[in-house]
Amino acid sequence: MLWQQVGAPVLELGWDFYASVILFVVLVALAVPVWAAIGAATVLMLVWSGALPLSLLGEKLFSGIDAFALTAVPLFILTGDVLVRTGLSRKFLDVAEALTCWARGGFGAATVLVCGMFAAISGSDAAGAAAVGRMTIDRLVESGYPRPYACALVAAGACTGILIPPSIAYIIIGLVLGIAVSTLFLAAVIPGILILVSILVTNVVMNRLNAWEGGGIMTPAEWRANLWRTIASGWYAFLVPGIIFYGIFSGRLTPTEAGAVAVVVTIAIGFIIGTLKLSDFPAMLVGSAKVNGVILPIIAFSIPLAEALAIIGVPQGFVGVMTSMTSNEYMLIAIMVLILVAAGCVMETTPNIVILAPILYPLAQEIEMNQIQFCVMMITALGVGFITPPLGLNLFVVSGITGESILKIAYRAIPFVFFMLIVTLMIAYIPVFSTSLLPDIYR
């Protein structure tokens, strides 16, 4: 009634919308797979609203995922799996540790760096949390960190999996909004590094306050000798991220082609150094297929859902309601960030992107926000949700591999969430962080 009193537009939605939302929430609460919950909600909305003929659903499911850019998703997932099985991920940890061993809290910093290195290849945060967690958590505890904090450190560092390119999340949002993936990758470089630095700084502050981990006594000459020795023994591991970054950012390879080359190079290195056998392939392919089999059905069902939402006027109505509440663009950006962080707390990135991007993007256009900046802000805000209760995915991953209480890990993750939110707001309000590396046409 207050809305009518102040003359604000009312977003009038019928049971075609509310029943679908209720069905989705109930199915997710019952632990039904997210793709199935989205599919059921989509079918109900289509039948109830008549927004699209149900006979077109099958065609929409396949046409929605018939995109060359999506081929990069299974390729990067497979690259990350091969990276772990060949032991190349341990080479990253060795180099990261050699870089930071001189400093107080050096192994904690190395853990964050190796999360970033893994992110620059796999594009997946859950995979990074599992792989890095198995290598580092026990050693972090031996170094003096409390186990819940060690788990929180890995969970926070692994958030860079969707923030540092190549990222599966940027591939998906590029597909949904029709933006070139290579452009989004370039825009994500500085924001991804800023998030990584914020996690490093947080760990330094927490370590200094609590005196958990000391530093090795090493002269500059000893440090340099140790670093070069470590690089010499594992330089070949860096061929993979080098090929990905050079290929994409030089324009010589599309993200999909870079993913394919990365898979081949990683497998070749595994055979050459003798850590990969033909017998490993079935398990690798099955594991990667399972992860990919979770992502693609979500995209397939979410695209007709997004079309139905647009037809019944949800995005347009949302823009009207938000702009009637306030015309202040800074407040509207803060509201968008709040929505995205909250959504990231309760649902995985892929469904959040394909459902929320078409709804929030018109609002960003209304306040003349740069489209690239919007995409980077969205992915970064969703990334914060990975370590935020109640359903932060990375919290569950590290809890699963250590047996540590999720609540204890979440409590220790609060400082990381705080500093990551600061960076997210910087990205949301200052376009230069996400557009400075782009050609003038995108600014």
Image (spheres, rainbow, N blue to C red):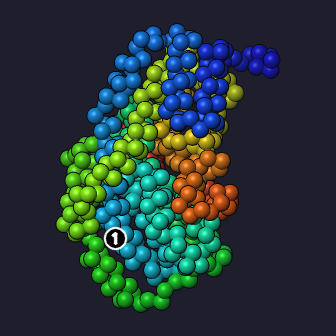
Q: Does residue 442 appear to the left or right of 148 in the view shown?
A: left
Q: Does residue 209 appear to the left or right of 181 in the view shown?
A: right
Mark 1 surroundings: few (<14), some (14-19) or many (≥20) residues within 10 A? some
> Furthest-front residue in view?
279
How many numbered marks appear? 1
> Where in the figure is residue 72, as x and y percent of width and height?
31, 42
Q: Amino acid at mark 1?
A: Lys
Q: Secondary structure at mark 1?
A: helix
The front one of 421 and 84 is 84
Which residue is painted at 53% across and 35% down in the image?
34
Q: Quadrant of residue 395?
A: bottom right
The front one of 27 and 52 is 27
The residue identified by callout 1 is 91
Q: Does residue 442 appear to the left or right of 345 in the view shown?
A: left
> Where in the figure is residue 299, as x and y percent of width and height?
43, 32
Does residue 182 appear in this view?
no
Q: Is residue 402 above or below residue 161?
A: below
Q: Which part of the image, by quadrant, shows the N terminus?
A: top right
Q: Quadrant of residue 234?
A: bottom left
The front one of 256 and 189 is 256
Which residue is painted at 58% across and 59% down in the image?
399
> Where in the figure is residue 322, as x and y percent of width and height?
64, 27
The front one of 379 and 132 is 132
Which residue is painted at 40% across and 44% down in the image?
290
Which residue is painted at 68% across and 29% down in the image?
326
Q: Which part of the image, by quadrant, shows the C terminus?
A: top left
Does residue 188 appear in this view?
yes
Q: Is residue 178 above or below residue 49?
A: below
